Structure formats: structure tokens, C-alpha cells
Amino acid sequence: MKVFHPEQGAAPEDYLDPLTGRRIEASREEYLRAKWGLEPRTLVVGRFHAGWKDLHLTDQKQKYAQVHWFPSFWGEVFLALFKLYIMKIRSRHARHPFLFVSQKDEVAGDPYTVASYRQAHAKAVKRIGLTAGKDYGTTPHGHRHAYGQLLTNAKVDPQLIQRCLHHKSLESQQVHTNPTPATIAATLVEATERLNSPFVLNDLQRALADGD
């Protein structure tokens, strides 16, 4: 899966020269304006605006960041759900090329807004019995932190984690990989259990007796 820069990313493969039938090499910004009469959503003002995080791009020519699924089976889950979405929801006759669309009656088919996504995410969080909020790590951005923590817990090399998170520097990912209070507490409990083991206690007692 590739996530293209909304302005600089290479135009989709369906951007063809009507005379030659060959693909036109252009940016997504040029493609949107020429074929659809639209602006990239990063440049739109109002409810349809959508931001872009300054990711480290995997391919500097086509300007995209490649998604790295972890565990890898989540890529298969996404693909299965994506196919259902395309077949059941995303009409090919939409007035725009944006992938995600609203399903509300009055705006059905319009580009899906960031506000609507956040509302839907909060409702989903509540449905599984959790509280939606930044302090609880249950906002959409919380998934990025969870992903970074999962890679850290799996002992993945920090430089590989940097590439997976598409950060431009190792320092940028520290906030996503710092241990959470729950992780610290669990680690200390395990350390306490090791400390209280008979073998460790005997070693401590001998050390104290020897004056070390």
C-alpha cells in the first residue's frame, strides 16, 4: 500500500493522454485540476480540508510513503475490508476521485471529512467499552503511538522503526516509542518477581554477609 503526497505525488495511472493513450507524467495537484477541476484537500479551505503529516517518503520520485503492516496479517485484513468497501460503498460514478466518501443521506458520495472520521472513531471506541480521548490513547492518532510501541516491544531495531513510522529523524519517534506508564508498571512487577526469587535473595544475603 502506498500513500501519495496529495500535491507532489505522482498522478494516478488513469491520467492518460486522450490522443496517444499514454500515461501523463504529472503531479496529483496537476491531475486534480486538469481532470476534475479540483484542488488537493491540503489546499482546500473549509470542511473538506485534510492535512498532511510531513512524512519521510519511501520514493522521492513518485512521492509516496509505503505502509508497513505489523503484524503483517493486518495487511490481509485491510485488503479484504478494502475490497468490500469498493464493491459496496465507493461508487465509480462519484463527482471526485477521493477514495473515502460520506454515507449520510444528505451528503452521500461527498468526500469524507476529517471531522466525520473523528466522530465515527469516537463512537467505535465507545462501542467497545472504552473512553474516547487523547489522555486515554484512544484518538485516531493514538494508533500511531500504539504501532510504535508494538514495534518497540517486539525489539525491532530503532532505525527500522523510524522507517516504519516514516520519521525523518530518530528523535522524532521518541514520543511514539517511549514506554507508557502501564508498560513501566508491568516491567517493574516482573523485575520484582525476579528479585524475590530464591536464587536472587540468596545472592543478596551472601553479598550483605560479605559486606559487598
Image (cartoon, helix red, strand yellow):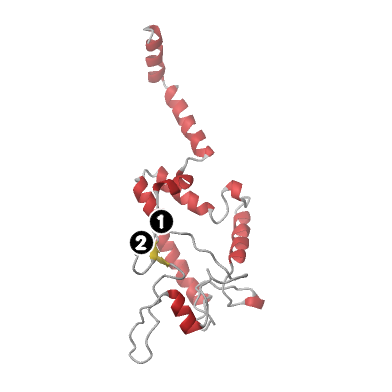
* Left or right, 33 with reference to 163: right
Q: Please state which amino acid type lies under the numbered disc 2.
A: Thr
N-terminal-most mark, 1 or 2? 2
Residue 179 drawn at (x, y percent): 48, 40
Q: Is residue 188 above or below residue 150?
A: above
Q: Position of residue 110 (x, y in %)?
A: 58, 76
Look at the image and tell me whether residue 210 can be seen: yes
Mark identifier at residue 74: none
Q: Residue at x 39, y 7 (%)?
A: 209
Q: Is 142 located above or below residue 114 in the figure?
A: above
- Mark 1 vs 2: CB contact within 8 A: yes
- Disc count in the image? 2
The answer to whether residue 71 is seen in the rendering is no
Image coordinates for residue 69, horizontal then vertical, percent: 40, 57
Q: Which residue is mark 1?
A: 166
Which residue: 44% across, 75% down?
28
Q: Classify mark 2: helix, strand or loop.
A: loop
Q: Nearer the viewer, residue 201 or 60?
A: 60
Looking at the picture, tell me which residue is in the foreground, 197 or 61.
61
- The amino acid type of the residue labelled 1 equals His
Image position, residue 8 (x, y; %): 42, 70
Judging by the rendered image, the residue that carries numbered circle 2 is 58
Q: Secondary structure at mark 1?
A: loop
* Few, some or many residues within 10 Å of mark 1 (<14, 14–19, 20+): many
Quadrant the C terminus occupies: top left
